[in-house]
Amino acid sequence: MPTTRKTGLPLYQRCYQDLLRRIENGEFRPDDRLPTEEQLCREYEVSLITVRRAVAELARAGIARRRHGLGTFVIGPPQSGKSLMLMGRLESVMSHSTEVTHRLLARRAARLAPELARAFGMEDEGMQRIDVIYLRGQPFSYTSIYAPRAVACGLDDAAVAQSHASVFHLLQDRAGAPVAHVDQTLDIAAAPKAAAAALGVKPGRPVQRALRAYYGQDGQAMFGAVVLYHPEHFRISMRFIP
């Protein structure tokens, strides 16, 4: 059952929507195992990257769960509470205003944050973690960026610390390819010790968390980020219109 291109949606979204339709119609019931990634690739006539992103969307929506070594299993169709997808400008998550400065806190080899793997289906293929604090007079976000070592190691600390460009732009330049789009999920998390110290809050205090995956034009994740916002120095405002 190849995916149609008439909708104008990305391929992974079309696969996701069709899998969702099949779950809602009862073709796949709770606790059923979905077809393997290879089977879905053949069925939808798409790449492995596309299938993984579609399945990651099911997991992020709480509709399916991955079990290591066993496959992906259906939890159930969406409940009455729905996830809302909003569209915005790419530049808004690539850069801040000219009033914002950043300070490099640490960088080291690290495993990919499990919450990024769960949210976006990203894979840990050798990462470097770069921790940065963003300030607008006072700290407002603590950002942990996960980038392939081959890309991140090309940046020296002085370049990161002294640049007026965001770290994301520096990584994009090092990768030699532009970021095509960013997926972001917002939730609430307890501030870990290092982040709490940088933000000036008590460890364990609930903070707004943004999980982001930055994708290239080939649909593959280039790097990811976990952003923790100061609970008093950051606010999101939205307007909904008919």
Image: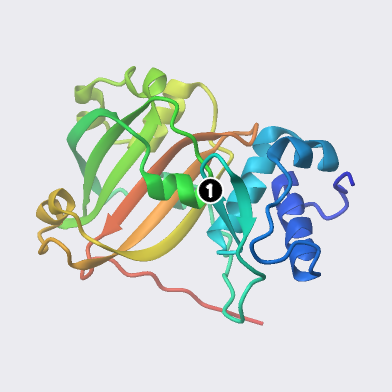
The x and y percentages for residue 21 are: 78, 64
Q: Residue at x 62, y 50 (%)?
A: 72
Which one is in front, 45 or 73?
73
Which one is in front, 22 or 74?
74
Which one is in front, 166 or 9?
9
The x and y percentages for residue 196 are: 14, 56
97 versus 217 height, above or below = below
Q: Quadrant of residue 165?
A: top left
**Residue 96 located left or right of residue 7:** left
183 versus 46 height, above or below = below
**Residue 34 located left or right of residue 190:** right
Q: Residues within 10 Å of mark 1 (few under 14, many from 20)?
A: few
Residue on which disc 1 sits:
67
The reply to whether residue 166 is visible in this rendering is no
The reply to whether residue 155 is visible in this rendering is yes
Q: Quadrant of residue 104?
A: top left
Count of labels shown? Answer: 1
The x and y percentages for residue 85 are: 58, 65
User: What colour scheme has been applied to the protein in the rendered image?
Assistant: rainbow
Q: Residue flagged by tag 1: what amino acid is it?
A: Arg
Q: Quadrant of the C terminus?
A: bottom right
The x and y percentages for residue 40 are: 77, 42
Q: Residue at x 62, y 45 (%)?
A: 53
Q: Residue at x 66, y 66 (%)?
A: 30
**Residue 124 located left or right of residue 242:** left
Q: Secondary structure at mark 1?
A: strand
